[in-house]
Amino acid sequence: MNFFAGLLLLLMPEENAFWTFVGIIDDYFGGCYTEEMIESQVDQLVFEELMRERFPKLVNHLEYLGVQVTWISGPWFLSIFVNMIPWESVLRVWDVLLFEGNRVMLFRTALALMELYGPALVTTKDAGDAITLLQSLAGSTFDSSQLVLTACMGFLAVTEEKLHELREKHRPSVLEVVEERARKGRLWKDSKGIASKLYSFKHDQEPLVEEKKVNKGDDMAANEEIPRIESHSSDLDELLHSLNVDSEVDSLPDLQEQVVWLKVELCRLLEEKRNAILRAEELETALMDMVKQDNRLQLSARIEELEQEVAELQQVLADKKEQEVAMMQVLVKLEHDQKDTEDARKRAEQELAAQKLEVHILQEKYEKAMISIAELQKRVIVAESMLEATLQYESGQNKALSSPRVGGRQSPHTDSNSRFGLLFGRGWLDKNKGKSNAEESGENLSSNAALGTESNDQEKQT
């Protein structure tokens, strides 16, 4: 409680600090700082149950290491986190605790610390490492806002009603343990008193024997000594009843010898009891050593199993890496093949575009040639019609010349003109026919070129 007093003296005068201290202990922590500390023990059991409810894996790991939750939460609750976490965080926790007027903030803060540092505790492999690590981490909780926010908002289910219910659940077991402990304490005190009495009787044995020898011839002195001896024996009545003395006591010759024998017997029994207690302590120590050794063997076996599992996982990881490297090589090869295919496709598209351009040009030339052929055909038709007309005219002239009436009237000039027109018509006709044949051959060539280009495109596409 000196932590509380020191903290309060830093904040207020001595008298105010005293009465504040009294109010906190009586109103907020009633029963926690009594001789039996019953409420403190109840709170430890309540916190352990909350830990099992919220963090079962962490509790199982701590139990596996041999760490009890009360070892951690006990100092936190008894000191209200003074000297356990930084001062700034302590004052923030005390603000909430005094404002709410109950001990709920204690449980919430402890649970918040476990939530913040539980993942680190799970990685520990020894009880000492776990406790040391938690003390170090808790002592470095400088972010008081995060701690208070986590405690107040993350554990809203921890209320005063729930804590009261859990306290009522665990208080009978704590009271039973306290009563059992008190009963054992009384037995120990009684045994200690008996031992001191027997020790004094053992050391007083010789004077009593000498006193018996001196007073053997004097009856009055013996009569005076008998009440004193009887007073000693009356002090031992309660002890004799508890020791179940057998019938051998009755066979002793007189009362003094009975008392002496009982003293010796009690000393012997006390010595045997002390030896038995020492033997029990030795056996308990040996048992604890065996348990520790057994725990070490279990931990060693567990460590070997974990190392074997780690080796297997490393082997699996190496195999996975080799598979990943092989897959990467395959992917790189596929990317190269895809790139080559893409380049070939681009070249084929360029060639196809060039061939299409050539086909387009040839098509335009073909269309122009067809237009020229059509014009030439029209001209041929006109020429043929003119030729036929000329031939008809010539045949008519020949017929007219062959007749005797007009034969002498025909002039040589007319004859020459008709012959010239006939020859000109025939020559022009032959010339146009030659041009039409040339154009038809050009058209056939262009159509053949177009067919060849289309066949090449089809081959490239396939």
Image: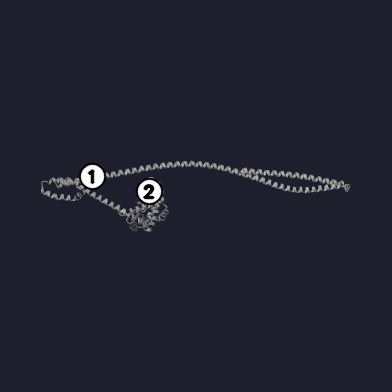
Residue in view at x 58 percent, y 43 percent: 341
Q: Looking at the figure, which quarter contains the C terminus?
A: top right
Q: Looking at the figure, which quarter contains the N terminus?
A: bottom left
How crowded pointer 1 is (Cα within 10 Å; few <14, some 14-19, many 20+) is rated as few
Sooner in the amino-acid sequence: mark 1 or mark 2? 2
How crowded pointer 2 is (Cα within 10 Å; few <14, some 14-19, many 20+) is rated as some
* Viewer-proximal residue among 46 and 462: 462
Amino acid at circle 1: Glu
Give the percent coordinates (x, y) of residue 18: 33, 57
* Viewer-proximal residue among 410 and 176: 410
433 vs 310, left or right, is: right
* Viewer-proximal residue among 204 and 165: 165
Label 1 residue SS: helix
Q: Which residue is mark 1?
A: 272
Which of the numbered marks, if any, corresponds to residue 60?
2
Label 2 residue SS: helix
Residue 1 in view of the camera:
no
Amino acid at circle 2: Asn
221 vs 351, left or right, is: left
Give the percent coordinates (x, y) of residue 244: 20, 48
Give the percent coordinates (x, y) of residue 316: 45, 42
Can you say whether 221 is above or below 161 in the image? above
Which of the numbered marks, if any, corresponds to residue 113?
none
Residue 56 in view of the camera:
yes
